[in-house]
Amino acid sequence: MTTTIQEQDGNMVAYLEGSLDTSTVPETEKAMLPLYECEGKDVIIDCTGLTYISSAGLRIFLNVLKNVEEKGGQVYITNINDAVRNVFSITGFNNIFQFK
Amino acid sequence: MPDFRRIDEIGQLSHSFGNMQQSLVKYIDELKETTSQKASIERDLRIASAIQKGMLPEKFPSRADRDDVQIYASLTPAKEVGGDLFDFYFRDEKLFFCIGDVSGKGVPASLTRAVFRTISVRESMPDRIMATMNKIIADMNRSSMFVTLFVGVLDLPTGRLYYSNAGHDAPLLIGAGVGMLPCDSNIPVGFRPSWKYSLQEAQIFTGTTIFLFTDGLTEAMDANQSQFQMERVTDVASQALAQQHQEPQQLISEMIEAVHQFVGDAEQSDDLTMMAIQYIRQQSDVKLRRSIVLPNDTQEVPRLNDFVGEVCQTVGLESIVAMQVKLAIEEAVVNVMKYAYPEGTQGVVTIEAVSNEVRLKFTIKDSGKPFDPTVLPEVDTTLPAKDRRIGGLGIHIVRQFMDSINYERSGNLNILTIRKKLINDNKQ
């Protein structure tokens, strides 16, 4: 699992690549911490390379959303594949995230 | 009726049944006192017994509805509002059922049944269900009523029957022959809140019918006050078996016919209740069996996912379904790793995958503390982000992506069974 964070066009973009199962959650959570300091910028989570997500992985997404919204930013998820999107749907997470 | 305001669901039940009980009792008392016309009393008592019957299940599953079990039951109330009850319902590939007889007419049988339902949503073992029912009914019990009760839980995939008996007549098993299910008698429910009810187990084979009844059957009386008795019940069952009539509806209709012939014109003295449950599941041949043993360390999850991935590939699941199965098993196993073994303790989790042509089954075993994930409350997936909590999501994912989940505690093992259908067979 690799996580890369970049600033692009005034937004913060996180690129997730690999399988976000329970074992890779701690390292990914740590790698995502800079997003909490978005200072009102919008955050885009690019899931092009994300092949799998567990409920522990969803918790990271939820924590990012709560922190970014508190600072006045928005969170967008982009390039999510059908299988991962499916997990967002059955847990109702598709209702609390914006997809691009 | 006691005051149950502190326990929400039971409180509501108690309240509504309290009202029903009071109005029913008042209704009957008024009728008895004020009416001199016998015909009128009889008409109104028919209405009262219709209320009692209306509280019982009416739709019985047959072979056309299910491929694992078929059920039929019959309750014929005596002239007064009676105390018999029966119930059954399905949860997580288990059949929960009970039959009972409430002594005296104080507490409605329907309330006892409602208590059974409420508790068996949360408890999966009959001795636990019985113990909780006993406490609740003892609490409500101002008069010295009691309930004889048999509670059974039939594990539908395996035919394993778990049961607990509280002073009720032992059911008959009608299969290879006719025999009594061995039952500890314990004591009836409702007057000794601390009684520890024993748990018993038996294997029910495909084709066998469990025949349950109340003493209204064995004690049905003819005009000379002699009773139908257990020997006759066994005889009728043996005759039915000899003619391959152990199918529930047919068995019960033959039993009713025999009682009618015996009783003749004599007035029915007690409620007459019977329930028959036939196990009809056919076991199919095993095509695949693999297992893996992991320590309770979430860093082992990739190994688990590789194992499940290979199993899914072998049975030919398409990749999106394979990912769902992988995720469901990860959630279930991580639950075990986190909750069955308290932090810092070491333990192992065994995951076995077995498939036949129609189903893929995962059995997850651990020797941690008793932990039943199937009774966790459902998560609300419609809440906004700030109110969302992550707990319970794992089990929700399992239920959404798989066809069934089933928990058993056997010895010192937690056994979780999760199944996925490989072909759509339009049944259920």
Image (cartoon, rainbow, N blue to C red):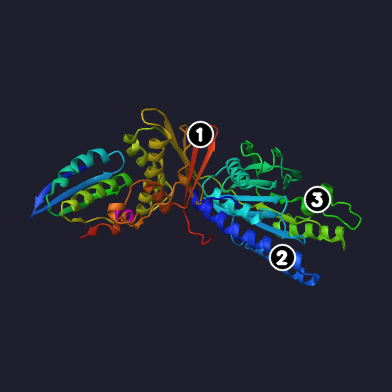
Residue B64, given in percent of the width and then of the height, sits at: 61, 62
Q: Report helix, strand or loop for mark 2.
A: helix
Magenta residues, as a range? A83-87
> Magenta span has A86?
yes
**Sequence-wise first label, 1 or 3:** 3
Residue at the image position 71 percent from the left and 42 percent from the top: B167
Q: Residues within 10 Å of mark 1 (few under 14, many from 20)?
A: some
**Sequence-wise first label, 2 or 3:** 2
Q: Is residue B77 left or right of residue B22?
A: right
Q: Nearer the viewer, mark 1 or mark 3?
A: 3
Total count of labels = 3
Residue at the image position 16 percent from the left and 51 percent from the top: A71
Q: Residues within 10 Å of mark 2 (few under 14, many from 20)?
A: few
Residue B309, given in percent of the width and then of the height, sits at: 37, 44
Would residue B334 be visible to someone looking at this image? yes
Residue A77, given in percent of the width and then of the height, sits at: 21, 55
What residue is pinned by disc 1? B413
Between the C-alphas of marks 2 and 1, the distance is: 56 Å
Q: Amino acid at mark 3?
A: Thr
What residue is pinned by disc 2? B30
Q: Report helix, strand or loop for mark 3.
A: helix
Residue at the image position 76 percent from the left and 72 percent from the top: B40
